[in-house]
Image: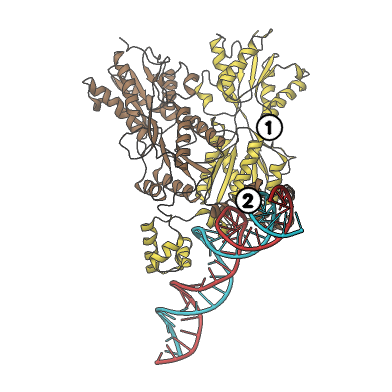
Chain colours: A yellow, B brown, C cyan, D red
DNA sequence: TGGAGAAGTGTAAGCGCTTACATTTCATCC
DNA sequence: GGATGAAATGTAAGCGCTTACACTTCTCCA
């Protein structure tokens, strides 16, 4: 699968501009990159030629010659859901202010695909990379190391991981929420999780719930667990399966808000009162939480702050002003209306 | 804002690999791009060197020398909402199958920013571009023309526009929906629109509603119109303003589902029964429609088909197998529960 | 066994830019 | 008016790759 750009209207090059403006290519280059170093008259002539020809620099050639791209990359698991959107938006805002272009790729939660994307972004000269979570192939990290590409892991915090990250403790957050659920008298607690394979956030959230159960002397292995794909409908289906069990769970913890919204919908479908007959909780605190009825009690993830700080950190690392750092942000419970006391 | 890659661990080049494998750079290049043209023993040696060095080709240099990138670009107005996600996903799936990488940029609904993104993607050597809607600067189109970059406009269909597009008729779809609303006896109809500046889809949807009113002898200018930003909360606020009017509208048409979800929420807040006291409709048919209560009656946009077909068209255009085409997809009404008869 | 053709490999010329360094131009001052 | 240095501009050497073309080995058959 290769192709050539049609040759009919040749793309103008620096040389074409130079010729038309009757200057050298060096002068044109300076006009574009350091205008103050060129006299006003020459500059005007060059700019006119640029306009007339519709010249735009060839990025590859530019990167090759200048060894810099002013481009950062971000690889997110999916664009389908809004989870990463807000954080990425904040990330991009900071970069735009600094004149850096952001390239976004999505891996579909597949580590192999992600490795390929990392390779591709590095080859494209990305100066730095934003990553989600710690789970990825060893080769991915090896590439990053070899090339010395500044990178930061977000949406997760692991003090033991040997790399920069700006995130929150998924396990602790879910443990805290679970403890609150237990405090309200619930004992039959079930969990709907996203696929945990290659997804440390999902895995840690499950672990968090289990550890909270264990801390109260309950058997973590007895907690019914549905692991399912990331969608509203899958969440509903999983909830349905869970509620067919006897005895029925009185609280269903969900690994993320989308699954929780699905569960909520299914509860309504089944005529179950939330939180009267069954409590449901989410994780992420995306806009969706306020849209559903009743509004979803969830764990608030500091999306925007995470995005902003990741951008600044990467900018500093690129500039040599930072060797990287590890920041643990808070992910507090966001109280709304879907968690109530266990039914009598 | 410039920087250099730290020089401590120099990035391996083709030449380093060649040296290590004791062959010429040409052979290494062939190993990577046309393995069958190299003997098995040599290939093994080269591949081993590639591994050991962690070599990855420099994209810029490659593009420069080969004049091809196998990269398509897409510029969407926003990533914040899910409207474009599904279509883009389908687009990407087709491209991935064909070995093409997708670069996504978002313009924040600002034509100037979009022009910049187009320039950037072209400079990066994008072989083809996916665009949303027809509204953009003349310079944007001029660049595309000059460089002969295959491009296709989606999410809109305009038979008169001089370019390829795969979309649907925003105006006609909204007119059809409005006619249905009128058929149910509604006469006091209001509209909540997204900002129409630089957004032809939004503008055409408003026009569609007005034309349906005019077709029934009603005064289109009398229709209350709230133009607001694209968010759930803005939708709620706009609905609130609309409902303070006397007499109150009995139906509120929304330019998209997110605004409609906001309206719906505000209606609940105000204790208004939907669709008993007021009907609300959306546009786009994103997942959200089934999440809200009651489920939203809306216009179904064929996201995935649009994405898939756009990908195929662009692939064909790049390969010279197509000079482009104009396809009008259907955008039928999706009946759910928020549109009812006008209250007596 | 020699020679033709295929297969494998090397040589070197760019691709379009940036930038160190060399050169020219020009204002300024004595 | 000529010397002086700053400002403006030009020259040319790469950046890391692909590929046309040339060259060297094989293979195989008459």
- Residue at mark 2 to residue at mark 1: CA–CA distance: 27 Å
Q: What residue lies at 40% left-to-right and 64% top-to-bottom?
A: A46
Q: Chain of mark 1?
A: A
Residue drawn where x is 37% and y is 27% of the image: B255
Q: Quadrant of the N terminus of chain A?
A: top right
- Look at mark 2 in the image and give the residue it sits on: B57
Q: Is residue B208 above or below residue B24?
A: above
Residue furthest left in the image? B217
Q: Is residue A216 above or below residue A69?
A: above
Q: Is B46 placed left or right of B241 in the picture? A: right
Question: Where is mark 1, residue-wise?
Answer: A198
Q: Secondary structure at mark 2?
A: loop
Q: Where is residue B106 shown, x and y percent of the image?
A: 47, 40
Kindly check if marks 2 and 1 are in contact, taking CB atoms under 8 A apart as contact: no
Q: Are marks 2 and 1 on the same chain?
A: no
* Rendering coords of residue B39 (x, y %): 71, 49
x, y percent for residue B36: 66, 45
Q: Is residue A66 above or below residue A341?
A: below
């Amino acid at each position: 699968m290769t192709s050539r750009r049609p040759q009919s209207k040749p793309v103008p090059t620096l040389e074409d501009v130079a010729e038309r403006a009757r200057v050298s290519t060096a002068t044109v280059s300076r006009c574009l990159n350091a205008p103050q170093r060129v006299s006003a008259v020459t500059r005007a002539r060059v700019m006119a030629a640029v306009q007339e020809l519709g010249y735009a620099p060839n990025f590859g050639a530019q990167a090759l010659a200048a060894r810099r791209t002013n481009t950062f990359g971000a690889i997110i698991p999916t664009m389908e859901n809004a989870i990463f959107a807000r954080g990425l938006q904040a990330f991009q805002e900071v970069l735009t202010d600094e004149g850096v272009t952001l390239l976004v790729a999505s891996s579909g939660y597949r580590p192999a695909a992600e490795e390929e994307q990392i390779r591709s972004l590095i080859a494209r000269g990305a100066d730095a990379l934003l990553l989600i979570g710690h789970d990825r192939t060893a080769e991915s990290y090896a590439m990053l190391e070899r090339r010395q590409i500044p990178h930061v892991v977000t949406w997760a915090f692991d003090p033991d991981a040997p790399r920069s990250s700006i995130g929150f403790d998924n396990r602790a957050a879910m443990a805290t929420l679970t403890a609150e659920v237990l405090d309200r008298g619930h004992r039959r607690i079930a969990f709907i999780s996203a696929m945990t394979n290659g997804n440390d956030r999902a895995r840690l959230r499950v672990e968090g719930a289990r550890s909270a159960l264990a801390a109260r002397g309950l058997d973590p292995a007895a907690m019914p667990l549905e692991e399912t794909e990331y969608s509203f409908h899958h969440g509903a289906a999983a909830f349905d399966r869970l509620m067919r069990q006897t005895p029925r769970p009185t609280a269903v913890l969900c690994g993320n808000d989308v699954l929780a919204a699905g569960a909520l919908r299914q509860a309504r479908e089944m005529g179950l009162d939330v939180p009267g007959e069954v409590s449901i909780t989410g994780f992420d605190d995306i806009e969706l939480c306020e849209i559903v009825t009743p509004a979803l009690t969830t764990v608030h993830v500091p999306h925007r702050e995470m995005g902003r700080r990741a951008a600044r950190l990467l900018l500093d690392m690129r500039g040599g002003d930072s060797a990287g750092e590890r920041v643990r942000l808070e992910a507090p419970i966001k109280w709304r209306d879907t968690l109530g006391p266990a039914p009598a």
